[in-house]
Amino acid sequence: MSSKGTTNIPGVCVIIKKGGKILASYRSNTGFKDNEYCVPGGHVDPGETFKQAAAREAMEEVGLHIRPEDLVYKMTVHRNGAKDIRIDIWFEALAWTGEEKNGVPDEHDHIKWLDLDELPENFVDYMLFGITNIAEGNTYGEFGWN
């Protein structure tokens, strides 16, 4: 019998929309998906719920305070990584307070409101997959599987 196991990494992604636009950060100096746009998101910390993690990531990355109860579930994406399995839970913020700002200038060059109908080609691939699928009404997707 094999003792092979897998590492599962839970993550969150947050859609913040305003007037047909989505708030995105431009990644830099991280070594992962640099020079690409992304929505706020990241790993779930021990002891956090997915909604708590999503609210924390939005505050850390774009300076907006989102109450967990103001996040609505949109989609689960099962991502196949090179050495792990990733589960991303997607939320959309229904409300927030504060002014958007680049909360992590050492990881993001800038933040920008992007037109949802004309997202740039240099958007993180699995995030573009999530945004597209959510727009199509899907609540589950698989990314990176052959």
Image (spheres, grey):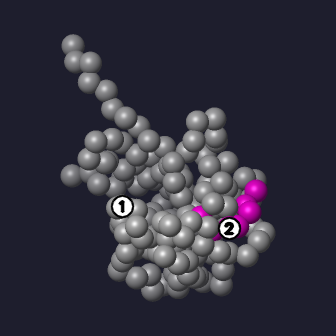
Residue 37 makes an appearance in the image: yes
Q: CA–CA distance between discs 1 and 2?
A: 22 Å
**Residue for point 75% across, 67% down:** 96
The spot of residue 13 in percent (x, y) is 53, 58
Which segment did they paint magenta? 61-67
Viewed as shown, does residue 24 lie left or right of 78? right
Residue reaching furthest to the right: 97
Is 117 in front, or is 4?
Answer: 4
Q: Are marks 1 and 2 in contact (CB under 8 Å)?
A: no
| Residue 81 among magenta residues | no
Q: Element at badge 1?
A: loop
Residue 135 position (above or below residue 74): below
> What's the residue type where badge 1 is placed?
Phe
Instruction: Point out the image quarter for the N terminus.
Output: top left
Q: Which mark is first along the chain, 2 or 1?
A: 1
Name the chief secondary structure element in magenta. Answer: loop
Viewed as shown, does residue 2 lie left or right of 50? left
**Residue for point 67% across, 75% down:** 100
> What's the residue type where badge 2 is placed?
Gly
Residue 72 makes an appearance in the image: no
Is 103 in front, or is 40?
Answer: 103
- The residue to which callout 2 is attached is 63
Rendered image quadrant of residue 123: bottom left
The spot of residue 103 in percent (x, y) is 61, 67
The spot of residue 80 in percent (x, y) is 32, 48
Q: Element at badge 2?
A: loop
Name the mark on residue 32. 1
Viewed as shown, does residue 140 lie left or right of 73? left
| Residue 63 among magenta residues | yes
**Residue for point 70% across, 67% down:** 64
